[in-house]
Amino acid sequence: MNRPAIVPLIDLSNTIGSGATLEARRETAALIGQACQRSGFFAVRGHGIAEATIRAMYDATRALFALPDDSKALLVTDLDDPLRRGFSRKTAVARSNDPGSRLAQIAGSSGITADPDDLCETFSICAAAERAGEADNPLVGRPNVWPDQPEIRAAWLAYANELSSLAGELMTLFAIALGLRATWFDYKINNDISSLTANHYPAQAVPPLPGQIRKGEHTDWGSLTLLYQDGAPGGLQVLGFDGEWHDVPAIEGSFVVNVGDLMSVWTNDLWVSTAHRVVNPPPEQAGSERYSIAYFHQPSFDAEISCIPTCLPAGETPRYEPVTSGQYLFDKVARMHTPANS
């Protein structure tokens, strides 16, 4: 008997928008719930994001990473910024894994004493920084850093706005899948602190160090991630049911969706935040570069994340202590940006 797909493709076309019926939402939510329990990953089509919006974002992102070095230097991450927005190169996402976890131990078990920096450069913004001031939210009012080209900023903000709406639709389907009222998450995400990050994986003119790949093995941090990837060599892999790594194909027009750590906390591990990585291209294609764009949906800064009632079996206690979305995010970002030799 064949096992279910690690990253099933789910059609949202009958689920999103004012014409969606409750029956259609329940059917789609059931598929999503199954995927979130099995692997924490699925892909969506029929999501309503216009191809022109995606293309404009990709064109703007390529233009952004093609800026001359002196222009990029003006946009480098400020280490006092808790979200490390702007350009960043010398980081390893694997360092954000929780201390003592299997993921955090991988480097040591392979003989590597510190996680080598990812072979990737990133540019990030926080959508909350574009909003008006909100009490008790240190991210609002601290501006994103932008290049002088206004068309790049416009494309990024238009894309972030569309992805915010899609993430909200998916959170509604998450609620239905978990046996909650459709609006259950609304008050937890109404002032979300989501971020948008573009990854540029340059051509590898110099062979990688031992254990060094484009993005190390990690889990994501928030409620969900929406990823749009191209089909260039050296791409996304997910750790499967069988303990093996599986390639995630780039399906044109679709988004890869995965559950983050906070959703695992919320669901008491009913839904899994699954390890994934981005590997190097084969040596004969080392000259190829790759782009991907990730929207990291994060609940409101002061939202308390604690076990959802429908995810707690009778007589059991939650596996996790309550945590606020903002503090959890800050801790993860700080750990990721710890120098490898510290």
Image (cartoon, rainbow, N blue to C red):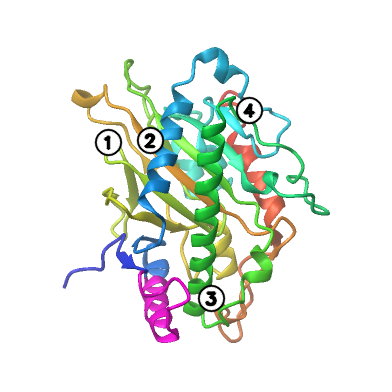
Which disc, if any, is residue 175?
Answer: 3
Q: CA distance from mark 2 to mark 3?
A: 32 Å
Q: Earlier in the sequence, mark 3 or mark 4?
A: 4
Q: Is residue 314 left or right of residue 50?
A: right
Q: CA distance from mark 2 to mark 4?
A: 20 Å
Q: Amino acid at mark 4?
A: Thr
- Neighbor class of circle 1 (other Cα within 10 Å; few <14, some 14-19, many 20+) is some
Q: Which residue is mark 2?
A: 291
**Is residue 208 among what the camera can see?**
yes
Decide: is 56 above or below 264: above
Q: Which residue is mark 4?
A: 77
User: The N terminus is located in which quarter?
Assistant: bottom left
Q: Which residue is mark 1?
A: 232
Q: Give the residue displayed 42% in from the left and 62% down from the top.
A: 40
Q: Earlier in the sequence, mark 2 or mark 3?
A: 3
| Residue 288 forms part of the magenta stretch | no
Q: Which residues are magenta?
A: 13-34
